[in-house]
Amino acid sequence: MQEELRAILDEYQGQAQLKPGQLFVIGCSTSEVVGKRIGTSGTDDVAASLFEGFTRFSKSTGVDIAFQGCEHINRSLVMERNAAEKRGYDEVAVIPVRRAGGAMASFAYRNMADPVIVEHVKAQGGIDIGDTFIGMHLKHVAVPVRVSTRSLGEAHITLARTRPKLVGGSRAVYEL
């Protein structure tokens, strides 16, 4: 699974070209990865494997990462304190656990250097593994990024990047 994730993220980065310091949000149902219904069979084994892959991606690109929790914690996110503070995000008081937050977010919380939980982010890119709906955490305007692999394990994946809004009217120019 790590090789599959690495290939997906490499292909994504080749197209999205996220810059160091930008934010990449991760929504992941480990239940869906193993072929079960979202929220029913979360597993630390899958979370550990994916966490390692996302950490590697973060280190190689310089991109900050945030792991979205499930609906039971209002899709709040786990991220490193320094990444949250540099963006001015407010910390909220909740600790994600497998049954309220999900296996991926709870694993990230237990394994990051100095994790905090924030309620909202505006990321420049992201991955949704298992239809967890990360769109609320992407900046406007989200643009789908198509990669050759459409699933990770048994879970459907969707990737996106963002671009600035196009403003103006019929006389506006968008490229030099």
Image: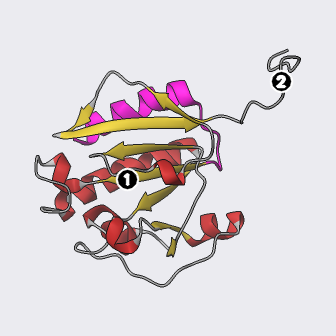
Q: Is residue 99 left or right of residue 119?
A: left
Q: Is residue 19 left or right of residue 105?
A: right
Mark 1 or mark 2: which comes first in sequence?
1
Asked whether residue 91 appears in the rendered view, the answer is yes
At horizontal 55% and vertical 42% (from top left) the residue drawn is: 61
Q: Is 19 inside the magenta-drawn segment? A: yes
Q: Position of residue 133 (x, y in %)?
A: 38, 50
Q: Nearer the viewer, mark 1 or mark 2?
A: 2
The image's colour scheme reads secondary structure
Q: Which residue type carries mark 2?
A: Gly
At horizontal 37% and vertical 45% (from top left) the residue drawn is: 128
Q: Is residue 158 left or right of residue 163?
A: left
Asked whether residue 55 appears in the rendered view, the answer is no
Question: What segment carries the magenta color?
Answer: 1-22
Q: Is residue 164 above or below residue 69?
A: above
Q: Is residue 3 above or below residue 107?
A: above
Secondary structure found at label 1: strand
| Name of the residue lying farthest toward the front | 170
Secondary structure found at label 2: loop
At horizontal 38% and vertical 81% (from top left) the residue drawn is: 95
Q: Is residue 118 left or right of residue 52?
A: right
